[in-house]
Image: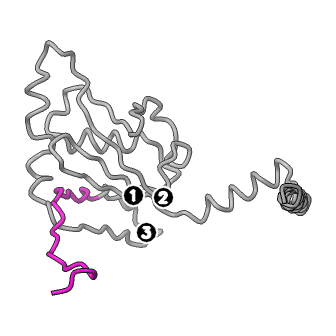
């Protein structure tokens, strides 16, 4: 009885190893150029990335960027919409908490494609106005008044004869975190 079990286990292991070996041999080994070409094709298919910036007061700022834009564009947008732009701030991702220091990276290289949640925090020493900076409003009043509205910008076709100025990106949409409403549901196993 013991030998039969051992024999069955050995046969299963042998067949598993043979399947793994066949799968490995059937895979196409790719050169670096081929891998880079596939990555460039994947990269060209993605046309936008949605970045959500969460503030400590549970407000969310959502902005859409092209994946080839740099993170510096996000930082510039934040300096325009933050209530106190004179204070130094930083953005970070979690988990684990990783501060974004290299703003010259594009969104694709930073890993923010097709979308990402980025957190905002003031970079204040503990002794200074740290409590005031953490409790106050983080967004300007004009941006807060846009809460709930969705703004879309449409770029017009440029006319060759007349020089046209490029309009700035519209202010992003601010969303407030809402608790999920659950309606009472009777479990299937409960019989009345």
Specify which label sits upstream in the sequence, 1 or 2.
1
Asked if residue 12 is positioned above or below residue 95 in the image, the reply reads below
- Residue position marked by numbered label 2 in the rendering: 114
Residue 181 badge: none
The residue stretch that appears in magenta: 170-192
Residue to which mark 3 is pinned: 158
* Secondary element at image label 2: loop
- 156 horizontally vs 138: left or right: right
Q: How many marks?
A: 3
Residue 30: which quarter of the image?
bottom right
Considering only order in the chain, which callout, 3 or 1, is on the residue closer to the N terminus? 1
Q: Which mark is residue 50?
A: 1
Seen at 43% across and 41% down, the residue is 71
Q: Looking at the image, is 31 positioned above or below residue 79? A: below
Query: At 56% across and 44% down in the image, what residue appears?
Result: 109
Find out whether the residues at labels 3 and 2 contact each other: C-beta distance under 8 Å.
Answer: no
**Kind of element beneath mark 1:** strand
Q: Is residue 186 above or below residue 67?
A: below
Gap in angstroms between the C-alphas marked 1 and 3: 26 Å
Q: Residue furthest bottom?
A: 192
For label 3, count other residues whose C-alpha is less than 10 Å away and answer few (under 14), some (14-19) or many (20+): few
């Amino acid at each position: 009885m013991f030998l039969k079990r051992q024999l069955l286990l050995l046969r299963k292991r042998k067949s598993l190893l043979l399947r793994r070996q066949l799968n490995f041999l059937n895979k196409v080994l790719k050169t670096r150029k081929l891998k880079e070409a596939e990555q460039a094709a994947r990269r060209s298919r993605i046309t936008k990335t949605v970045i959500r910036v969460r503030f400590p007061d549970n407000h969310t700022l959502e902005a859409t960027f092209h994946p080839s834009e740099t993170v510096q564009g996000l930082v510039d947008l934040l300096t325009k919409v933050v209530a106190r732009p004179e204070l130094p701030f930083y953005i970070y991702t979690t988990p684990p908490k990783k501060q974004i220091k290299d703003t010259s990276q594009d969104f694709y290289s930073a890993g923010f494609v097709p979308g990402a949640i980025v957190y905002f925090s003031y970079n204040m020493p503990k002794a200074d106005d740290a409590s005031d900076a953490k409790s106050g409003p983080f967004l300007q009043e004009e941006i807060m008044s846009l809460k709930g509205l969705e703004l879309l910008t449409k770029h017009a076709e440029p006319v060759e004869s007349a020089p046209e100025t490029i309009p700035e990106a519209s202010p992003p949409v601010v969303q407030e975190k809402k608790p999920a409403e659950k309606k009472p549901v009777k479990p299937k196993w409960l019989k009345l």
